[in-house]
Amino acid sequence: MERGDFDVALSGLEDRPELRARHAVSLPYFEFREVLAVRAADSARYRKLSDLSNRRVATLGATMAYQILLDAERESNVIPVSYDDDIHPYSDLVAARVDAVLLDHIIAERSLHRMSGFVVLDSPIATGHYVAVFARADSALRDSADAILRERMRDGSLEKTFREWGVWDSSQSIHFARVLAASSPQGVAAVRNERGSIAAYLPSFLRAAGITLLLSCLSMALAVAIGVLVAAGRVYGSRIVQAPLAVYVEVVRGTPLLLQLFVIYYGLSSVVRLPAFLAAVIGLGLNYAAYESEIYRAALKAIPRVQLEAARTLGLSERQILRFVRGPQALRLALAPMTNDFVALLKDSSLVSVITVVELTKQAAIYATNMGSWVVPGILCAVIYLIFSLPLSRYARRLEKKWSVA
């Protein structure tokens, strides 16, 4: 919008100080309430956020509700879980993957029409407003939109629209009266977004970086272990063993990682409900195991046959040949592509945000949304990725040099 690609943003945008600091914002045309949804069996013990200490509470990332949960995390040890859509939070609540959902009341009420198994608590956690957003330099268009909104509030046509869509209630009448009576209908003042500073987000960045590193290391360890077994099976196994392993490799390499993560986390939920982090480790591990197995298989095949025949002539068993002759040389050949794969996995770990794991890139996206720019979050995110990947690459090159044959 600031580039001039379009003129107005209007899609349930919340009236927040950081939004007003960056853009021209209309008067608040709708009042929403942040409400908690819990499973019916938990409605008696979970009445407010402080009751959810050490419990997982879902919401949309980079929203007023998400900021409320971050504050509750500091005050009551609530565990925020960020989603990219407003469907899966409620389905995961019913599936007992999270303990509550904090979102706008109209989202909660719509979700109740789609599924059962949860209730929406009566007492709201907070109140907010939806606004239309215009480019900062386009205040004249914003003023025209404000005049139209005021007139539609006065003549009842906006109320009629809200009633037709089933989102009208008595609070909107009070809100309309307050907006029309206000001398300045702009609602929230444009203030400096202190939460947009690097210092405010650095702890979250470091925590997300730790999650990314741990996730990548565990996934790579799983990929190496499975990759070795698959490669050994395809090199030494019978056709009965080789066939299913070949199918596994081709299916995994021929389908998107994102699809595989969705299948493991959501598709298999009726059979096994994996925690998001564990599903991410398994998904990344199984995906990269297929690529690792091809690296190891190629490395094993690259060892000259004359060496293997010489070892057999000396009376070594196939196990001894693999351990003392074929394996060490194959490891040296596989080291460089293994390192490349780990760096690639480190970057592909950003995809696990779709199954609610808040890793480094997801945290950068939340920071960028609140800040209104990708420059600082993007640079900070890139620096952390480079800090992780460059030492690994240099260490691998040192090993290659050390193991190289003159």
Image (cartoon, rainbow, N blue to C red):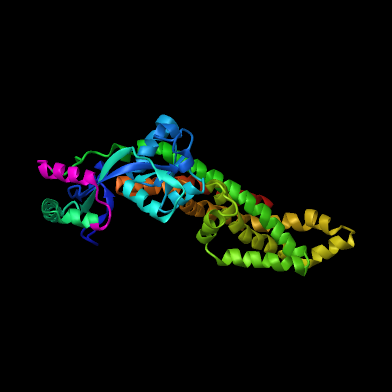
Residue sitting nearer the eye, 173 or 254 = 173
Q: Position of residue 9 (x, y in %)?
A: 24, 56
Q: Main secondary structure of the magenta part?
A: helix
Magenta segment, which residues?
Answer: 164-184
Quarter holding residue 231: bottom right
User: Residue 191 appears in which quarter of the rendering?
Assistant: top left
The answer to whether residue 51 is left or right of residue 324 is: left
Instruction: Residue 44: give x, y in percent of width and height.
Output: 44, 35
Q: Is residue 196 left or right of residue 99?
A: left
Q: Residue at x 64, y 64 (%)?
A: 248
The question of residue 347 being in magenta is answered with no
Vertical arrangement, residue 253 with respect to residue 380, above or below: below
Q: Position of residue 125 (x, y in %)?
A: 33, 37
Q: Is residue 250 in sight in this rendering?
A: yes
Q: Quadrant of the N terminus?
A: bottom left
| Residue 26 drawn above or below residue 248 | above
Residue drawn at x 59%, y 57% as measured from the top left: 288
Q: Nearer the viewer, residue 50 or 158?
A: 158
Number of marks drawn: 0
Left or right of residue 288: residue 143: left
In the image, residue 404 above or below residue 55: below
Residue 379 shows in this picture: no
Residue situated in front as seen by the camera: 190 or 63: 63
- In the rendered image, residue 108, in percent from the top left (x then y), is placed at 37, 48
